[in-house]
Image (spheres, rainbow, N blue to C red):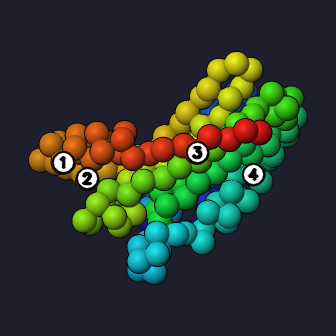
Amino acid sequence: MNGREPQEDLCQLFPEESFDILVLGLQEVDRRAEAYMYNVSVREQVWCDQLTSALSRKYPSENYVKVASKGLVGLFIAVFIKDKFHKLVSRISTASASCGILGIVGNKGAVGVRFKIYDDYICYVNCHLAAHPNQIVRRNQDLADLHKRLCFPISRT
């Protein structure tokens, strides 16, 4: 997303046919210096609002509800579900872990959403790792580290 606010019609991000669950993972949604310093993004709500609006335009006969979203600097994930299944969702939790500079800056890392539907847990993770072919070892190390550190709190509801 190169640090931009949503300006285009986001309907193009969604498939032509509707699905029961839609997950969007975006990267580089916030590239401001203060976002890197504090590992937060004020743009998470802007993106959620714009995606919700785009969903209602793309699928006017469907009603999607946001299950959860999570942001970490430039990383963002949002999970939407058709309203008719929303009451079947429970134990929603989100998590994030950084693996950027010194293993703490959130320019690289992962965000995730986990929830229970019926009797099964579903987990979606969006990762942003080191780029370029010569960074394979680093990506594999970061992925192993994220696997250990991306912990979802237990939700009772």
Q: Give percent across and percent down for residue 3.
A: 47, 68
Q: Give percent across and percent down for residue 122.
A: 60, 28
Q: Kindly state the secondary structure of the residue where label 3 is placed.
A: loop
Please state which of the two labelled residues, at mark 4 or mark 1, is closer to the viewer. 1
* Dot placed on the residue nearer the N-terminal end, 2 or 1: 2
Comparing 74 with 109, the one in front is 109
Please state which of the two labelled residues, at mark 2 or mark 1, is closer to the viewer. 1
Q: Which residue is mark 2?
A: 130
Q: Which residue is mark 1?
A: 138
Residue at 62% x, 26% y is: 121
Q: Kindly state the secondary structure of the residue where label 4 is placed.
A: helix
Distance between the alpha carbons at the discs numbered 4 and 1? 36 Å
Distance between the alpha carbons at the discs numbered 3 and 2? 27 Å
Residue type at mark 3?
Pro
* Dot placed on the residue nearer the N-terminal end, 4 or 3: 4
- Classify 152 as above or below 37: above
Residue at 75% x, 34% y is: 90
- Classify 64 as above or below 28: above
Distance between the alpha carbons at the discs numbered 1 and 3? 27 Å
**Residue farthest toward the bottom in the current orientation of the protein:** 34
10 Å crowding of disc 1: few (<14), some (14-19), many (20+): few
Q: Which residue is mark 4?
A: 52
* Dot placed on the residue nearer the N-terminal end, 1 or 3: 1
Residue at 60% x, 37% y is: 114
Q: Kindly state the secondary structure of the residue where label 1 is placed.
A: helix
10 Å crowding of disc 3: few (<14), some (14-19), many (20+): few
Q: Which residue is mark 3?
A: 153
| Residue 30, numbered circle | none
* Dot placed on the residue nearer the N-terminal end, 4 or 1: 4
